[in-house]
Amino acid sequence: MEVARAKPLIEQLLLRLEQAEGHDELQVLSEEMRDALGIDHLVYHWVSSTGENYGVGTYCGDWIARYLEKGYLRMDPVVLGCFQRFHPVEWKRLDWSSKAARDFKKDAIDYGVGNQGFSVPVRGPNGQFALFTVSHNCKDDLWDAYTQENRDLLILVAHYFNQKALEFEPVRTGDPGQPLSPREAEAMTLLAAGFSRAQAAGRLDISEHTLRVYIESARFKLGALNTTHAVARALSRGLIVV
Amino acid sequence: MIRYLDADQLDKFPKLRDSMFRDRACQFKDRLGWDVKVDINGFERDEYDALNPMYVIWENADGTHGGSFRLLPTTADCMVNDHFSHILDGAAIRSPFIWECTRFCLSRRAEAYFAGALVLAGVPFVQDFGIRHVVAVFDARMVRIYRMIGASPEIMGSEGEGRDQISVGLWAFTEEAHARVSKACGISTVQIRHWFHQSFKAPKALSQTA
């Protein structure tokens, strides 16, 4: 479960994710991402704006068949707990108090899902919804340390999977290619030219916090893990020129 | 006390919910004269309330609403991007680490420290959800209130004049900012964390199965 050393690999996977062209590639990437993240399972499930369900992930086929056969989707506390939320959810904080939920949990553990889980609900435009989940089998303290350390990374990976899913939408929404706004491009250009955040903020006559919002928004649009990667991507795509 | 209510939990607190939507009607329609819809029950609700926001609410001892705001992620449909991008940069602010705060409302009976407590309610978001900034939509009157409680957002852009001015601002969650607001309103961040964990704890502890 050591992730820090896998960061360059994760960054590479995200680049491939961005270029992925179909469901099969997404499936392969979900498996490789699972390995890079050092956990037992990763699942990315999305509901398109027309209500169709899609999924990729690493759960074994037997569990997926069982899940469908038992109609677990209707009572799965993870699905119910995440559907109307948009913040990450630790499985332990969900409502497992009913007998049905406890039986479901036991069943899931028997099929190797793991006793720990962390889910990130993702909302896109026009009611599009997705759920990104990582699960693992380990003790509480280990898991708490893992999710605390990697929470932001998991949130980003979840959203980048979703950016790709939005491209598969029958009716494309949002801005294609997500060009940077003038302010975002200016901020990235100054960082690329070697300005510090304080200097860049000064040049743009905005506060450092406002600058951070532009950089954060640009990073997200560029699908990068951190500012350095975001600058590199903006340069390589010709979105900024130094 | 502060309650954090995800959309699916709001209906478990009907008194709190109804008094919040009434207080919003009172603030935004009656007092500020905004062009908002008030329904037959006297509730001010808009299409963004239908998008499952999270509500952060000051609950009075009698279970009614003392003040509140609602949060939406900037990755999906939200007011800043749908209606105010022209006063920012012409482009959307989108990040899973930036949320939008709208409908910051105080009941007519609100105590002076409620506003500070509500702003402070964002403290646990950094630790638990990775949120470092909140963009907010607010009117000219709130600028003064935010200043009074030591939580002036940075104005990123405005439109309109005088009392009718509406701004998009930015709150950055920093320890200095929290310390300042906490001192001004007399509520500790420890207290806020307690309320947060009360709201988000599991209904029943899950037994260890590892």
Image: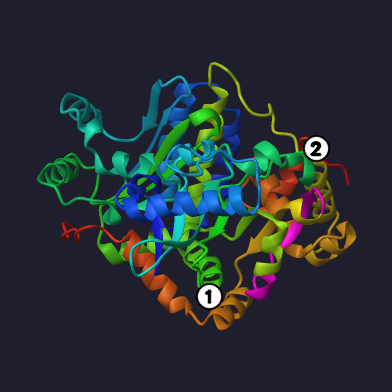
As drawn, A63 above or below A235: above
For this orientation, the residue located farthest to the top is A170
Q: Quadrant of residue B150?
A: bottom right
Specify whether A61 is left or right of B21.
Answer: left
Residue occupying image coordinates x 40% and y 43%: A34
The chain that hosts pointer 1 is B
Answer few, some or many: residues within 10 Å of disc 1's Cα (few below 14, many 20 plus, some between 14 and 19): some
Specify whether A201 is left or right of B149.
Answer: right
Specify whether B158 is left or right of B79.
Answer: right
The residue that label 2 is drawn on is: A239
Please tell me whether residue B49 belongs to the stretch shown in magenta.
no
Q: Amino acid at mark 1?
A: Tyr
Q: Position of residue B28 (x, y in %)?
A: 60, 50
As drawn, A14 above or below A166: below
The mark closer to the camera, 1 or 2, is 1
Residue occupying image coordinates x 15% and y 60%: B207
User: How is colour applied across the structure in the image?
Assistant: rainbow
Q: Position of residue A131 (x, y in %)?
A: 40, 38
- Residue B84 appears anywhere in the view: yes
Specify whether A140 is left or right of A206.
Answer: left
- Report the magenta residues as a range: B146-161
Q: Nearer the viewer, residue B96 or A109?
A: B96
The chain that hosts pointer 2 is A
As drawn, A128 above or below B25: above
Residue occupying image coordinates x 66% and y 48%: B33
The residue that label 1 is drawn on is: B113
SS assignment at label 1: loop
Q: Amino acid at mark 2?
A: Leu
